[in-house]
Image (cartoon, rainbow, N blue to C red):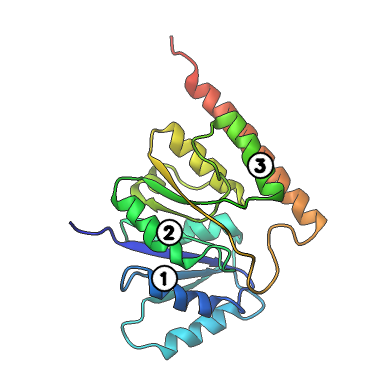
Amino acid sequence: MKHPSVTIILPTYNETENIIELIVEIQRYAPAASPILVVDDNSPDGTAHRVRRFIKSQKANNNVHLMVRTMNRGLTNSLIDGIAAAKSDVVLWMDCDFSHPPSLLPKLMHTIEIGADIAIASRLNNTGFSRILNSITQLVFGRNITDYTTGFLAARSHVIQRIPLRGNYGEYCIDLLVRSQAAGYRIDEIPYKSPPRRNGTTKTAPNVITFIHHGLGYISALLRLLWEIQVLRRPTA
């Protein structure tokens, strides 16, 4: 049986302390020669420069690629551009702070191979704002998914083409999973304990203003989805 090809997308912003070590560890666990695409939002800390140096230091068959974005920056737009550049059967993306362990890549890919349309890594130790969001989302859209905000997943490319990402930050993940579930796609979960960020600072809520901004984005996404799902469920004349 032919194994599906995969592109690993790494959206980065100020991850110079983690990115090379992460790439090296991903290369240990990902299928051989799978493209690793770093999509950097023009990080001022030199993330892209460090990746370029790493690429130049590798041999001709190096599978690491770099995309630097200077316009329409943000997590979701980075993922959209990375997905558009991928030529594989499956796209997989993850955070670059080691809270998403590369050792889970084989399990995610195996889950896709045995029939899942989307495979997500679900945190057993979900806490804080993310835990509250998941509780609300489960209450409204069902408990078939335990971690709607994971951000660590693999998906068949044709699924993402049919259900493109929407949003500005992490709310894209809730949006994708709710709409995929409503469309009848199979979503399987792999439970894991998320380790703490290895280096650098969090992008989720570094200050009160950012926390409020992201929080409003999540609330807006939930309200939009609730309305859209209700419209889909209405009987037609």
Q: Which residue lies furthest to the bottom in this view?
A: 57
Circle 2 sits on which residue?
92
Q: Which mark identifies residue 133? A: 3
Question: From the viewer's perspective, is the residue at label 3 or at label 2 nearer?
Answer: 3
- As measured in the structure, the alpha-carbon distance from the residue carrying label 3 to the one carrying label 2 is 23 Å
Circle 1 sits on which residue?
36
Instruction: Tell me the amino acid under the disc marked 1.
Output: Ile
Q: Which mark identifies residue 225? A: none
Residue 113 image offset from top left, x and y in percent: 29, 52
Q: Residues within 10 Å of mark 3 (few under 14, many from 20)?
A: many
- As measured in the structure, the alpha-carbon distance from the residue carrying label 1 to the one carrying label 3 is 30 Å
Residue 145 image offset from top left, x and y in percent: 51, 39
Q: Earlier in the sequence, mark 3 or mark 2?
A: 2
Which residue shows up at 48% across the image and 23% down it?
232
The secondary structure type at the circle numbered 3 is helix
Question: Which corner quadrant holds the N terminus?
Answer: bottom left
Instruction: Tell me the amino acid under the disc marked 2.
Output: Leu
Instruction: Tell me the amino acid under the disc marked 3.
Output: Leu
Q: Is residue 62 above or below residue 174?
A: below
Q: Camera-side residue: 62 or 188?
A: 188
Q: Is residue 168 above or below residue 45?
A: above
Q: In which quarter of the image is residue 45?
A: bottom right
Q: Residue furthest right?
A: 208
